[in-house]
Image (cartoon, rainbow, N blue to C red):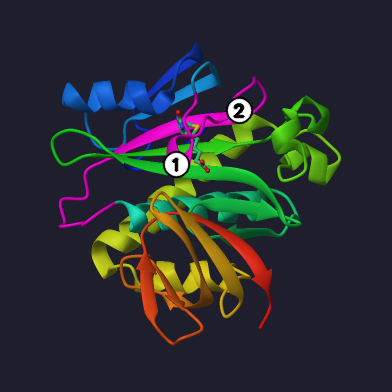
Amino acid sequence: MKLDTKIIGRKIYCYKDIPSTSEEAKRLAGLGVREGTVVLSESQSQGRGKLGRSWFSPKGGIYLSIIIKPHINLVEGSLITILGSLAVARAIRGLTHLEANLKWPNDVMIHGRKVAGVLTEKGSSDSFIVGIGINVNTRKASFPDELRSESTSIRAELGSKVNLEKLIPVLLEEFEKLYLIFLSQGAEKILDEWKTLSSALKTWVKVLTANGEYEGKIMDLGKSGELILRDSDGNIQRFTTGEVVKLRST
Ligand code: BTN
């Protein structure tokens, strides 16, 4: 695999099957491996998704976790999740003609269906673990019933298989480009580009969180990548994680 990066993926631990690449990356971060180390697996038996869900991880997808140590005071990982999902969208757009879009906070969508997700977790000693799962060559019929209508894969949208050996380096290169911009210039450019690829701004949504459901209009993303919502009484609420369900366009 040809990889044109300086930090991200200089060392890649490859597995055939592993419970979770993010779990393994956490362990490695605890041992003090260098920044940019990647854990990659062909499949996962206990892939983790956001909000405590599991992540369907059969062979044919990309499952990888990147260890980063940004050394800046990040309150939480929201910005990194935004950065990671933008890297996925850029990589898919760059390698295929598919119009990958973004759905806050961590979903990459094609034609309204989820093709990839990003889960950022805190690791030990100032590290963050950025877990990325992409449905690449997964057949539509193989998704479990409860996921089939809302999920898709690159193969299903493209009508042909995609070479993982090509997509993985493009993804890591896009991630590094954005990460270096983030470190040197802050998050503004990343948030701006993210917003251009998101269709939900200014629409009415329901946000499902561990603490309940909230309805309102998406006004913007905050400086930390948080979702800013205005409810019908004009109250402003900020969310750092959750699931957005679109209700109507205005
Ligand atoms: C989501 O729920 O949208 C986030 C899914 C993140 C899945 C990836 S796959 C690689 C890494 N290892 C895990 O166990 N989860 C993440």
**The C terminus lies in quadrant:** bottom right
What residue is drawn where x is 67% and y is 24%? 60
SS at badge 1: helix
- Name above or below for residue 14 compared with residue 77: above
Q: Relative to the observer, which residue lies in front, 201 or 92?
A: 201
Q: Relative to the observer, which residue lies in front, 152 or 190?
A: 152
Which amino acid, mark 1?
Leu
- The quarter holding residue 8 reads top left
- The quarter holding residue 25 reads top left
Q: Which residue is outermost to the right?
A: 159
Which amino acid, mark 2?
Phe
The residue carrying mark 1 has its beta carbon less than 8 Å from ligand 1: yes
SS at badge 2: loop
Task: State the image coordinates of residue 157 (x, y, percent, origin top left).
Answer: 80, 46
Q: Residues within 10 Å of mark 2 (few under 14, many from 20)?
A: many
Left or right: residue 69 versus residue 192 is: left
Left or right: residue 14 versus residue 135 is: left
Left or right: residue 69 versus residue 80 is: left
- 1 vs 2, front mark: 1
Task: State the image coordinates of residue 86 (x, y, percent, origin top left).
Answer: 50, 57
Give the residue pinned by disc 2: 56
**Is residue 4 in view from this perspective?**
no
The prevailing secondary structure element of the residues shown in magenta is loop
What residue is drawn where x is 55% and y is 49%? 88
Task: State the image coordinates of residue 219 (x, y, percent, origin top left).
Answer: 48, 80
- Name above or below for residue 148 compared with residue 242: above
**Among numbered discs 1 and 2, the one appearing first in the sequence:** 1
What residue is drawn where x is 42% and y is 67%? 190
Numbered range of the magenta stretch: 47-76
Give the residue pinned by disc 1: 51
Q: Relative to the observer, which residue lies in front, 76 or 194?
A: 76
What residue is drawn where x is 26% and y is 60%? 183
